Amino acid sequence: MSSLMVPPVLQSPREDATQLYRAFKGFGCDTATVVNILSHRDATQRAFLQQEYKNMYHEELTSRLSSELSGHTKTAVLLWMHDPAGRDATILRQALTVSINLQAATEVICSRTPSQLQTIKQLYYSKFGSRIEYDIKMQTTGDHKKLLLAYINTVRYEGLETDRAMVERDSKSLFKAGEKRLGTDEKTFIQIFSGASRAHLAAISAAYRNIYGSLKKAVKSETSGKFEFGLLTILKCAENPAKYFAKELYKSMKGLGTTDSTLIRIVVTRTEIDMLYIKAEYRKKFHKTLADAIHSETSSHYRTFMLSLVGS
């Protein structure tokens, strides 16, 4: 792909800082150099680089990037400069207090593991001086609010073992709470979806399918709106998180125009976690590489940066 650059030779944080400073000097910013360096540095390297830049030039690298870059490139690069947990905390703060985006907030909360959520909660409070629970309460309502608060505060097992009797009991409870009755017992859905480990919920889904049919279809027919989206995110990420994110990426680029905020959020947040699996699922499901899809939906330095993160 012509817009992909050759990765720069790995340099010391001091050399990177010097090159970036030179890229900022003069008339206009040498965005190509900025993008090429930063897109090939992992979280630890980025942290050292930011510290070195501040020591050498007495300003925050992110502040300089914010003033030198623009558009989607700026959004993506600034998000990338965080470590994963700090990035999630920043996305959630933005989605819950600045440019309200409850879909983004729901996606981040409902797709993260219990240990990730604990770290995010701590960072959220230390960075913004506000408890994430308070901001969730301020912006959400009804069952959606109850689900997010339960999911972010319930300690869940993260191992792979499941109890067959409990699986059968919970699948039966979900059937009784939804498809079997007139109306829906949302409390039972919230309790099971927020309390079950991923392995347990995936086993519930399989058991439910064997007896009653698709649990996803049950959720869709029994719930709606952001509450439905939250439940489905939890369920799909329990079964196959890479497949879930591959589909969300496809949706962000489908049809006329691209939902760049979603594309950037998913690519940047998953690059250092499970991007290899997401790419494999994307190709399997849509018979096209994720890199090809991004190439056709983006342009210029934004395209280069996103493709560098995804890898061809």
Image: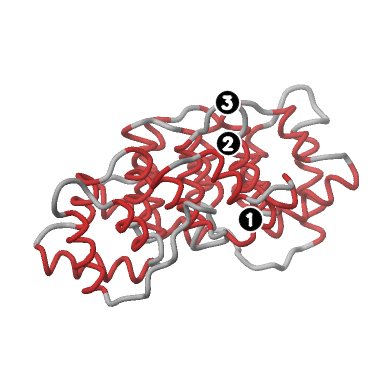
Viewer-side residue, 122 vs 191: 122
Q: Earlier in the sequence, mark 1 or mark 2?
A: 2
First of labels 3, 1 by sequence position: 3
The residues tagged by marks 3 and 1 sit, at their Cα atoms, a distance apart of 22 Å
Q: What residue type is disc 2 on?
A: Met
- Amino acid carrying label 3: it is Leu
Numbered disc 1: secondary structure: helix
In which image quadrant can residue 137 be found?
top left
Kindly check if marks 3 and 2 are in contact, taking CB atoms under 8 A apart as contact. no
Residue 271 vs residue 230: left or right? left
Crowding around mark 3 (Cα neighbors within 10 Å: few <14, some 14 to 19, many 20+) is few
Whole-percent x, y for residue 280 in the image: 68, 57
x 54%, y 45%: residue = 295
Q: Measuring from the top left, give residue 140's x and y in whole percent.
A: 45, 30
In the image, is residue 177 above or below residue 172? Answer: above
Q: Amino acid at mark 1?
A: Lys
Q: What residue is at 56 percent from the left and 36 percent from the top?
A: 252
Q: Kindly identify which numbered label has been placed on residue 253.
A: 2
The residue pinned by badge 3 equals 256
- 99 shown above or below 167: above
Residue lying at 82% horizontally and 40% vertically, measured from the top left: 214
In the image: residue 262, left or right of residue 186? left
Q: Residue furthest left?
A: 58
Q: CA distance from mark 3 to mark 2?
A: 8 Å
Say which residue appears at 39% left-offset and 43% top-offset: 133
Name the residue carrying label 1: 279
- Quadrant position of the N terminus in the picture: bottom right
Identify which residue, 21 or 159, lies in the foreground: 21
Q: Secondary structure at mark 3?
A: loop
